[in-house]
Image (cartoon, coloured by chain):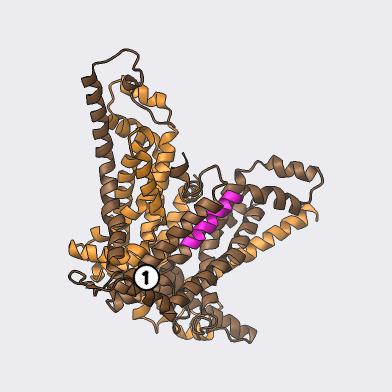
Chain colours: A brown, B orange
Amino acid sequence: MLTTTPPVAAVPAVPRPRGRRARLRRGRLATVAVFLAPALALFLLLVVAPILVAGYASAYKWNGFGLPENFVGLDNFTRAFGDPTFRGDLWRALVLIGLSLVVQLPVALALAMLLNQPLKGRGVYRLIFFAPYVLSEVTTAVLFTLVFSPNRGLGDGLARWLGADAGTIFADPDTVLFALFLVISWKYFGFHMVLYLAGRQNIPRELSEAAITDGASAWQAFRHITLPLLGPTIRVSVFLSVIGTVQLFDMVWVLTGGGPIHASETMAVTMYQYGFRRFEVGYASAISIIMFVLSFAFALFYQRVVMRRDTEGAITTRGVQR
Amino acid sequence: MTTSTRRLTLHLVSIVIGALIVVPVLFGVLGGFKDNGQLATNPLGLPDPWVTGNYTGILGDGVFWRQLANSTLIAVATALVVVGASAMAAFVFARFAFRGREALFTLFAAGLMFPFAVAILPLFVLLRTMGLLDNPLGVILPQAAFGLPVTIIILRQFFRTIPAEVEEAATLDGCNPAGFFWRILLPMARPALATVSVLAVVTSWNNFMLPLVVFTDQNWWTLPVGVQAFQGQYSDDTARVLAYVVISMVPALGFYAVAERQLVGGLAGGVKG
């Protein structure tokens, strides 16, 4: 623990009058209070309170105006789990997470390994791969709407050039989720790649070099040395990917609005539809709370079971373990 | 494989992936120089002739500049509030021992797991009650609040690396905690402060959901809200929307070019600790 106490209090060799010590401690407590106040006030008022309010509102049928009065208990939750759209939201979140784990993250990892080798111009490649991350989801979504717009888009033009028909992947309920996943990957794989690159750079090069000297193939060195040592980084990247998918909103809202016929709708989009369009604030709050509980339960489970082995700070363990 | 074929393969793979990133953006840039007739007949090639009206029309109109100014104001104010409040909190979390410290810190750290979307609805009701709709504070303060966890975590990490001797020396020289914080700790933490500020600016710049619900008054719209609305308004005029998208990308990409190191370092370091 690196906490410093002022030297006066740290050296109690000479007995001091109690009053002075108490005064000192009061002074330090006052400092603590003053320095914590702004952050604590902001956090309690604008993060904690809204979540508590959502919990409260989720037990009511409420249009958002005045005080909630029509208590319905858990009805909003049973309604959500009985609603095919919301159940679809859950399923689509699972599909998107699965696709990320199987496609996006491995590709990011492979690229990070490639770019970790000495290669002229790799800085430029890294700059380009990461660039979409700084664009907003809205900008990305509008760009891709137009890229795939029928008749005037790049996708359609390419398809016509190849003699195929691909101008409608966002309009077809069977393909829209995959199209959405493509755009998500376009924007986010560079972020995960940068995480892996940073993690890779913390692993001493000598380890895999020694293995290769001892006759291991490059693949074996990667599989048995680099990959396990990258474990903490990979687990954080998976964690962020899952949490990001649970709250996915901007990109879907702009690209498809959740359509066609709910085929790309996410929990956040459903929540927005009910909360801000139909003024069923109670029901929308219940959906918020389900999102919250899912994220929280996942984070706890992940921290306890998956990240426990990581000695050096992962996102959720940081405060707790020291 | 010899070294040179190996290198060639690496370059080829990187170039293909790079093309997947660049081509859609390039399509936007070139598309902005076409008219819709050209986009329909010639979506892939160079514009012929080059039409500049889409770009000059947007740049000559006040709407884009107003949205740029709004985005900038909100991003800078958010960064100031979140970094200021977090630095103070991180200071006591890093350098004071008091009862409940770890519990409080865990509360903040747990904020990382609160999806913004969870709070947006009650937040909206709250802001409406406080009269902060159509007020930039209605976006700035919640953004700052949700930025606290990651900022506090990164800054506390950094503040802990400053040796206790520095603080002892300052105390002996008559510095009280506030003086030490303001005159010694903050100047020493400049790199970390730059990193968290860049993160806060980028997050605010890209935020969509909150300004979408807070601002009904168009004069307050930020770039993401504006881009989305522009697409709705000119949905028949693809070339013009492409030009708007491209222009709205420029500030973000420019900022990235300048602050790449802080951004990448902050994300990698912040996440890994």
Q: What's drawn in magenta, residue-wise?
A: A231-243
Can residue B58 be seen by looking at this rendering? no
Whether residue A286 is situated above or below residue A39 in the rendered picture: below
> Which residue is more in the foreground, A149 or A276?
A276
Residue farthest to the top, as pictured? A14
Residue B158 x, y percent position in the rendering = 43, 38
Q: What residue type is labelled 1?
A: Ile
Residue A19 shown left or right of residue A322 in the figure: left
Q: Does the magenta stretch include residue B228?
A: no
Quadrant in which the N terminus of chain B is drawn: bottom right
> Which residue is more in the foreground, B57 or A301?
A301
> Which residue is more in the foreground, A173 or B134?
A173
Residue identifier under label 1 = A287
| Image quadrant in which you'd find residue B134 | bottom left
Magenta: main secondary structure = helix
Mark 1 lies on a secondary structure that is helix
Whether residue B160 is situated above or below residue A75 in the rendered picture: above
Residue A93 x, y percent position in the rendering = 49, 70
Q: Which residue is found at the position 25% from the left and 71% from the top?
A: B218
Whether residue B85 is situated above or below residue A14 in the rendered picture: below
Residue A78 shown left or right of residue A215 in the figure: left
Q: Few, some or many C-alpha atoms within 10 Å of disc 1 (few <14, some 14-19, many ≥20)?
A: many
Residue B68 x, y percent position in the rendering = 32, 63
Q: Please state the chain letter of the residue tagged with numbered disc 1 in the rendered image.
A: A
Can residue A264 be seen by looking at this rendering? yes
Residue A227 x, y percent position in the rendering = 66, 51
Q: Which residue is found at the position 41% from the left and 79% from the top?
A: A83
